[in-house]
Amino acid sequence: MGSFSEAKKPFPFRRSCRHFMLIFIFVESALFSSVIPAHCADSINLNEIEVLRGLSPSIQSSSNIMFTGNESTLKFEADSRVFIFNKTMIWLNQPASKKDNDFAIAKYDADNLVTPLLLLHQKENMTNSNLTVILDPGHGGKDTGAIGPKKSYESRITLDIARRTKKILDSPQIKVKLTRKGDSSLSRAERSALARQTKAGLFISIHVNFSDNSNASGIETYIVAGPGFPSTAGNSSDNKNAAGNKFDCSNAQLAYCIHRQALDITGATDRGIRHARFDVLQDAPCPAILIECGFASNPADETNLLKKEYRQNVAKALATGIMMFLNPSQPVISPTNQPVTNRLTSSNTASITSCFTSCYTTGENSAR
Ligand SMILES: [Zn+2]
């Protein structure tokens, strides 16, 4: 992930004494609590969320509740930010809570995460597609990003995955552009600017993870944190209503489609759909996600990342996930043991659907 990682941002007071840190944390907390937007405190009982009413609730334990339907299963845990949707880990913007026998989540999460996911397959097909997809290979040039012990370079791996994805996805109906075509430097602002200039419909940023813990492995997918809510990795927040928050509804759906496909096709460990305020997500003028395709710091992940077969599988997952998002009523199924069609056929691109119109509308109803 390199410089995109919030966790790796240089902390300005790293060398200062603990007193300064405590003062800083106190002031930050005080400022945050004084500006916390009202919608962050709004919660809703799960049994009052309309899309959950058609599902059967069952209390699993004193801290867990499950909702089961024909096509979807959801599991929430009290005091946890993680919920499970169709076997996929997804972070809430705010932990679920439990009072007496009632479980509740933030209304923002109900409107922008849970509801869009449950309505994904009910969107109308798009009959006329003229879509530009921006694939953003992370880093480049002097900024190599993560470098693994076996000399895996993030900037090279992400570029290779982006090129492979473009080969699969490019068609008369879907124009695929890369933010960089070679090993060149590119600022984060330039990456978002290309999406604006091309009036892109989707923005996919591709990265490789790194951790001091070499046991950490698997795939993470990020969407921008809800306004006023902390990122997955942090406790503090800002009240910024970023441009990318306009698409929170679509961001959740796009992340799910791609993340689910990535897990199914690669067999990688599920590290969940998470929230962060990466620049490319905050500034995106369209639905956007950032995917971490594995850990260069993990021996097994790095071995995979160095194999072209693994990178091709990630590319298939990105292409398939994008198609699943565009055409949710006819998802492209690509189990691990079956090859994905190498190029989209004219018949399925002609019927490509989009939830853009509806999501752009519902995305704007969010309290901000
Ligand atoms: Zn990176």
Image (spheres, rainbow, N blue to C red):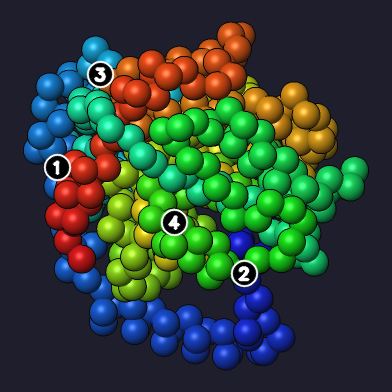
- Residue type at mark 4: give it: Thr
Q: CA distance from mark 1 to mark 4?
A: 42 Å
Q: Position of residue 200 (x, y in %)?
A: 41, 51
Q: Earlier in the sequence, mark 1 or mark 4?
A: 1
N-terminal of the pair, mark 2 or mark 3, is 3
Q: CA distance from mark 2 to mark 3?
A: 45 Å
- Residue 74 sits above or below residue 213 on the image: above
Q: As drawn, is 184 to the left or to the right of 328?
A: right
In the picture of the structure, the residue carrying the numbered disc 3 is: 68
- Say which residue appears at 38% left-offset and 55% top-offset: 199
Residue to which mark 2 is pinned: 187
Q: Which mark is residue 218?
A: none
The mark that comes first in sequence, 4 or 3, is: 3
Residue at mark 1: 45
Tell me which residue sits at (81%, 35%) in the image.
306
Which of discs 2 and 1 lies nearer the camera? The answer is: 2
- As helix, strand or loop, the secondary structure at mark 2 comes to loop
**Real-space Cα distance between discs 1 and 3?**
17 Å
Q: Nearer the viewer, mark 1 or mark 3?
A: 3
| Secondary structure of the residue carrying numbered label 4 | loop
Q: Looking at the rendering, in which quadrant would you find the N terminus?
A: bottom right
